[in-house]
Image (cartoon, helix red, strand yellow):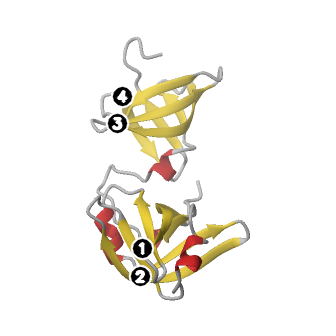
Amino acid sequence: MKEKEYLTVGKILSSWGVKGQVKVEALTDDPNRFKNLQEIAIDLAHGFIFYQVQSVFFLKQGFPVLKFKSIDTREEAEELKGYYIKVHRKDAVRLPKGHYFICDIIGLTVDNELGDSIGTVIDVLQTGANDIYVIEAKNKKELLIPAIKQVVKKIDIENGTMVIRPMEGMM
């Protein structure tokens, strides 16, 4: 499975102030990662546009506010509203062993331990206690599988597979 080259870390909500800053919704477990960003990419319909990060600070509500070197007016910043901020995978935070980026989990084919095909992961719900993998089963129904060691036995990102042991009554 080809890994995604860029990972989404935030969404631009609006311009902020009059000097070209943007208010961002953090789409990462650790919003403090924005403090270390040097370059970001925005995925436009016709390709990526890259910006150098000039400064970052946080509002009281926790929202990061970013200033890009080439954006100097409120109007220029407003044009970026609604776009997602991405970072190159090489610049992403390093995850501990056994942890994965959501974008790498979505699309995995899911089998049970006997090798029977269950379906494909189509979404990951973050509940706080543990993630829930939403699997589109072969019959087009959605299955909700808790991302816990008792159920998820193996994740192989490179081969695009996940092996599960469903709990009684789960399926």
Q: Amino acid at mark 2?
A: Gln
Q: Which residue is mark 1?
A: 91
Q: Is residue 98 visible?
A: yes
Give the Cα separation between the discs numbered 4 and 1: 31 Å
Whether residue 75 is situated above or below residue 89 in the rendered picture: below
Give the Cα separation between the discs numbered 3 and 2: 31 Å
Q: Which residue is mark 2?
A: 38
Q: Which residue is mark 3?
A: 127
Q: Secondary structure at mark 3?
A: loop
Query: Of the residues under marks 4 and 2, which one precedes in the sequence?
Result: 2
Q: Residue at x 41, y 11 (%)?
A: 169
Image location of residue 76, percent across then percent down: 58, 79
Question: Which disc, if any, is residue 152?
Answer: none
Residue contact at pointers 3 and 2, CB within 8 angstroms: no
Give the Cα separation between the discs numbered 2 and 1: 9 Å
Q: Residue at x 50, y 32 (%)?
A: 134
Residue contact at pointers 2 and 1, CB within 8 angstroms: yes
Q: Is residue 157 visible?
A: no
Residue that protrudes farthest toward the front in the picture: 18
Give the Cα separation between the discs numbered 4 and 2: 39 Å
Query: Of the residues under marks 2 and 1, which one precedes in the sequence?
Result: 2
Q: Amino acid at mark 3?
A: Thr
Q: Is residue 1 left or right of residue 95?
A: right
| Mark 2 vs mark 1: in front | 2
Q: Which residue is mark 4?
A: 151
